[in-house]
């Protein structure tokens, strides 16, 4: 079965420190992977995606993600966190077979950046 | 959120009533989707449509219905058969079925 796991419900980081939000996946075939961010009572905003090519993907707002095929991971990173980065982050993988084109989401990780 | 609108932002429903949530996009996207979001559960797919006049059930379609009569519109009806409809509903669209999905601002439905 295709799935995405975000092992941490919450990540706490001090402003200016690097941040990592973890994601692991399980799919058959080559994965298409996505990261989205959600602010309270808002829709999801697309941050970045991995389809193929360079394992380090750069996205919006200074975020990047590293694809690691051997560890089936796609962790989201940022070198220096901002208080305004505090939000809910979702990792997603594109489904295959009967779910072709659909996104399978993780349960989300709440990022809290303190001044 | 730009290009995808959802209305209303907040919706209250009495038990036993059907309600329809609106989703409109002006991005000329072929594919549209409806998700339900509950705290701690991420997003779950309700219905999706990859082309006008065609749609498929997602993982949790029971108690919901949709139509896709126009490319830009994909309304979702929450019927009285949906046992636990209180949730945040998100609409999304993409150029094609394999492309990046972009989300609307959401509708929060509360059953009184």
Image: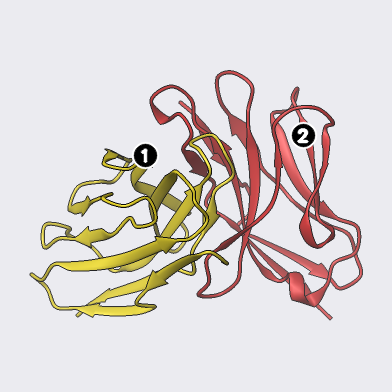
Q: Secondary structure at mark 2?
A: strand
Task: Please rate how many residues cluster around mark 1, counting C-alpha atoms within 10 Å: few if below 14, some from 14 to 19, many from 20.
Answer: some
Query: Eyeballing the image, is A65 above or below B109?
Result: above
Location of mark 2 (residue): A67
Q: Are marks 1 and 2 in contact (CB under 8 Å)?
A: no
In screen coordinates, is B6 left or right of A29?
left
Task: Please rate how many residues cluster around mark 2, counting C-alpha atoms within 10 Å: few if below 14, some from 14 to 19, many from 20.
Answer: many
Identify which residue is drawn at 44% across, 64% down.
B39
Protein chain holding label 1: B
Location of mark 1 (residue): B51
Query: The chain drawn yellow is chain what?
Result: B
Which colour denotes chain A?
A: red
Protein chain holding label 2: A
Task: List x then y, in percent, for residue B84.
Answer: 22, 62
Quadrant showing the C terminus of chain B? bottom left
Question: In the image shown, does B109 or B20 lie closer to the viewer?
Answer: B20
Question: In the image shown, does B37 or A17 lie closer to the viewer?
Answer: B37
């Amino acid at each position: 079965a295709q799935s995405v796991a975000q092992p941490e419900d919450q990540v706490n980081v001090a402003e200016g420190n690097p941040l990592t939000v973890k994601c692991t996946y399980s799919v058959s075939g080559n994965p298409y992977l996505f990261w989205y961010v959600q602010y309270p009572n808002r829709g999801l905003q697309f941050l970045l995606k991995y389809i193929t090519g360079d394992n380090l993907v750069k996205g919006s707002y200074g975020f990047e993600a590293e694809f690691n095929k051997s560890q089936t991971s796609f962790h989201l990173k940022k070198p220096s966190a901002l208080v305004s980065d505090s939000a809910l982050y979702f990792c997603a993988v594109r489904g295959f077979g009967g779910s072709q084109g659909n996104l399978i989401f993780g349960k989300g990780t709440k990022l809290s950046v303190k001044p | 959120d730009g290009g995808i609108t959802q209305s209303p932002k907040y919706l209250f429903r009495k038990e036993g009533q059907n309600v329809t949530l609106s989703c409109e996009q002006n991005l000329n996207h072929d594919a549209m989707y409806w998700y339900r979001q509950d705290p701690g559960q991420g997003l779950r797919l309700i219905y999706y449509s990859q082309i006008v006049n065609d749609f498929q059930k997602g993982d949790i379609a029971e108690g919901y219905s949709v139509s896709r009569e126009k490319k830009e519109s994909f309304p979702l009806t929450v019927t009285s058969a949906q046992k636990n409809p209180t949730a945040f509903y998100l609409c999304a669209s993409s150029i094609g079925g394999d492309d990046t999905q972009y989300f609307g601002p959401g509708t929060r439905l509360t059953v009184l």
